Image (tube, grey):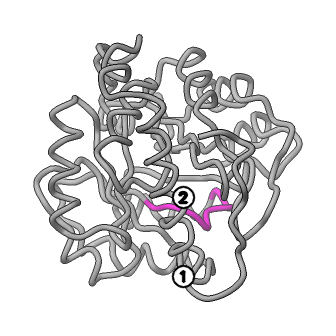
């Protein structure tokens, strides 16, 4: 997975998501050829016990915010090309973030493995490996890189894959966050091997956002799972409303990263909650 890999075109047929998944299959194949499963299992973080997502999300002294480090996105292009991973994630942590989300997708989000390794070295709170998981190998990578939580996106996985990947991750001690976009995805994807269910307010087909998606789905999520609202959160009042509706966590990406100083942005945001 090198950064100089040829960038796939975003035009043409199929959704952005289809293109990402296609590219992801190539990336995973290349990664497997470079780093063996045994190498991953021998890495320094593989034996560490992951932090409990639930514990940090519900902690009294934390905000429930999952603060994201991301450089770019397919919809916005470059968001922040100069931010320092260690500096930003430490500032997120200091401002009361319950967890960190670190993008590791290279081509579409400008992420890299070093980002998650750097964030891990600098922080003692849960880290979500934010990527498009299509293979158990990526779950082993997440564990090897020091992540505590993996993301399973319902729209790119079968119910069987969600169950199997969830079990595989849980057996490694990882926390599992399932992401859904609508009721149909939610109903077909619920299984015992999940810790949290996130409602993504962004339509991954056309990348439009609508916070109402969260309010429509919150009561459909069984109460045994942590409830997370993702994307389209740019106002502290929205967090108050989402909390009142029953959400435990709030994934915020672009809102902080699009500023010159993401660490200051989260501090000011939290002061208003």
Percent across and percent down for residue 75 are 71, 71
What distance separates the C-alpha of mark 2 from that of mark 1? 25 Å
Does the residue at mark 2 contact the one at mark 1 (Cβ under 8 Å)?
no
Nearer to me, 122 or 18: 18
Q: Quadrant of residue 141?
A: top left
In this rendering, position of residue 114 left or right of residue 241: right
Sequence-first disc among 2 and 1: 1
Q: Is the residue 34 above or below the residue 197 in the image?
A: above
Q: Is the residue 181 above or below the residue 270 in the image?
A: below
In this rendering, position of residue 130 left or right of residue 186: right
Q: Which residue is mark 1?
A: 205
Nearer to me, 130 or 90: 130
Q: Residues within 10 Å of mark 2 (few under 14, many from 20)?
A: many
In this rendering, position of residue 223 left or right of residue 86: left
Q: Disc number at residue 239?
A: 2
Residue that sits furthest to the left in the current view: 192
Q: Residues within 10 Å of mark 1 (few under 14, many from 20)?
A: few
The residue lying at 57 percent from left, 63 percent from top is 231
The residue lying at 30 percent from left, 37 percent from top is 54
Asked whether residue 23 is drawn in magenta, I would say: no
Percent across and percent down for residue 156 are 37, 70
* Magenta stretch, residue numbers: 229-236
Please state which of the two labelled residues, at mark 2 or mark 1, is closer to the viewer: 1
Label 1: which secondary element: loop
Percent across and percent down for residue 179 are 37, 63
In this rendering, position of residue 231 left or right of residue 86: left
Asked whether residue 232 is drawn in magenta, I would say: yes
The residue lying at 49 percent from left, 51 percent from top is 131
Q: Main secondary structure of the magenta part?
A: loop
């Amino acid at each position: 997975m090198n950064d100089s890999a040829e960038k796939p075109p975003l035009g043409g047929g199929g959704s952005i998501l289809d293109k990402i998944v296609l590219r992801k299959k190539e990336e995973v194949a290349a990664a497997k050829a470079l780093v063996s499963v045994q190498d991953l299992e021998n890495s320094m973080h593989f034996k560490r016990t992951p932090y409990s997502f639930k514990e940090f999300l519900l902690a009294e002294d934390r905000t429930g915010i999952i603060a994201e480090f991301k450089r770019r996105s397919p919809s916005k292009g470059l968001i922040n090309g100069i931010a320092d991973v260690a500096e930003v994630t430490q500032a997120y942590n200091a401002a009361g973030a319950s967890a960190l989300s670190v993008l590791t997708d290279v081509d579409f989000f400008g992420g890299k493995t070093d980002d998650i390794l750097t964030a891990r070295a600098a922080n003692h709170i849960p880290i979500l490996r934010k990527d498009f998981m299509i293979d158990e190998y990526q779950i082993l990578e997440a564990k090897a890189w020091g992540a505590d939580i993996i993301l399973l996106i319902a729209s790119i996985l079968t119910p069987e894959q969600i169950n199997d990947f969830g079990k595989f991750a849980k057996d490694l001690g990882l926390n599992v966050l399932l992401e859904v976009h609508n009721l149909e995805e939610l109903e077909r994807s619920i299984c015992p091997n999940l810790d949290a269910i996130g409602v993504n307010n962004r339509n991954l087909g056309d990348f439009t956002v609508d916070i109402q998606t969260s309010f429509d789905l919150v009561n459909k999520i069984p109460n045994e799972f942590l409830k997370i609202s993702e994307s389209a959160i740019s106002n502290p009042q929205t967090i108050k409303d989402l909390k009142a509706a029953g959400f435990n966590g709030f994934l915020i990406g672009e809102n902080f990263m699009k500023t010159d100083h993401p660490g200051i942005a989260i501090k000011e945001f939290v002061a208003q909650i």
